[in-house]
Image (cartoon, rainbow, N blue to C red):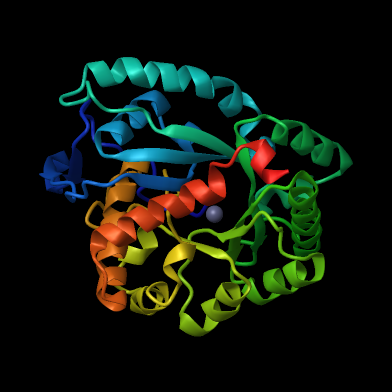
Amino acid sequence: MSDDSDRLKLPPFRDARFYRKRKHSSYQEVSAPCLGASVADTHAHLHMLPDPAFELARCAVNGVRYLCMIVDPVEDGEEPIERLDDWVSDARRELAGLDSGGHCEVPRVRIAVGIHPHNASAWNGEMRRALHRLALDARVCAIGEIGLDYHYDLSARDAQRSAFREQVRLAQDLGLPAALHVREAHDEAFAILSETGFPPAGTLLHCCSLDADEIAPWIGAGCFIAYGGALTFKKLEAARKAAVSVPLNRLLTETDSPFMTPEPMRGVGCTPAHVVFTAAALAQMKAQHDGISPDEVLSALYENALGLLDRNREELA
Ligand SMILES: [Zn+2]
Ligand SMILES: [Zn+2]
């Protein structure tokens, strides 16, 4: 999660196309990149969107076949988890009404549960038990987003560190991967993980915008690195240079919707379907760097997401 002034300014059209805001409250259609491949959004706050079912239908038409919904029981309660199955069935109905929606499949939706560092001050034994109980749901595929956020410091740093440490241990106990949110605290987060041990089921660094030096230890520790809209921001050239140095089998795509809208969609709220823009940009730059085809990168991005975040409990145990 991060602040983003684009949040929730969604175009008022009930179709699966993309629209950019222009002056005088009008909108201009933006063509979707022609990917011809399945895409995964590994980090979406689906329940924060005004119409989650419709956004899933929009994902389906745009080739987004997997989505991980991030739920923080302190901030969101348990309602998103309770409503998810209804959103998925409503999305199937919405699809029937969309142009070219008839043959598309609603994405497979899994859930990550965790207390965000912003809410770490609410961490206690009761919260740990609640999180443990929620994590036993077969749809839960990771503990997250957890970590440290020293940019906003919305919870005291001591509280952030202990909530993080204990949730990493929970991920280890449950045999689940950890999805990390780390902002201006990477050295400390890395030190905590070195002390607890990185979860054997995998660690994912979400919303990455680190440069090559900063990212090196995370790659060395075998972490997955997820890129969202920030990868497309003009000023983040150093992050793009770092992204191409991540091994192909460790790269992931995400949105962090409703935050972090990618180019060329800046100015409207981010929805999970926007992941196609980030996937296209990442595939292009990684393919060029590695001397392979963008299609090879796209299929690796998708397989990486499923391999990390779509395992069933027997595979993880
Ligand atoms: Zn985050
Ligand atoms: Zn987030």
| Residue 89 coordinates in the image, percent (x, y) | 42, 17
47 versus 298 height, above or below:
above
Q: Is residue 160 visible?
A: yes
On the image, the x and y values in percent for residue 164 come to 74, 57
Horizontal side of residue 71 vs 212, given as left or right: right
* Residue for point 32% across, 44% down: 38
Asked if residue 8 lies left or right of residue 1, the reply is left
Seen in the picture, residue 97 relative to 239 is either above or below; the reply is above
Q: Quadrant of ligand 1?
A: bottom right
The residue positioned farthest toward the front in the image shown: 315
Residue farthest right in this picture: 125
- Res. 76 image quadrant: top right
- Above or below 17: residue 165: below
Q: Measured from the top left, where is residue 192 in percent x and y?
A: 76, 69
Visible in this render: residue 9? no
| Quadrant where the C terminus is found in the figure | top right
Q: Nearer the viewer, residue 261 or 121?
A: 261
Q: Residue at x 50, y 41 (%)?
A: 68
Residue 159, position as x, y percentages in the image: 79, 57
Left or right: 196, with 239 as reference point: right
Task: Tell me if 69 is positioned left or right of 291 in this view.
Answer: right
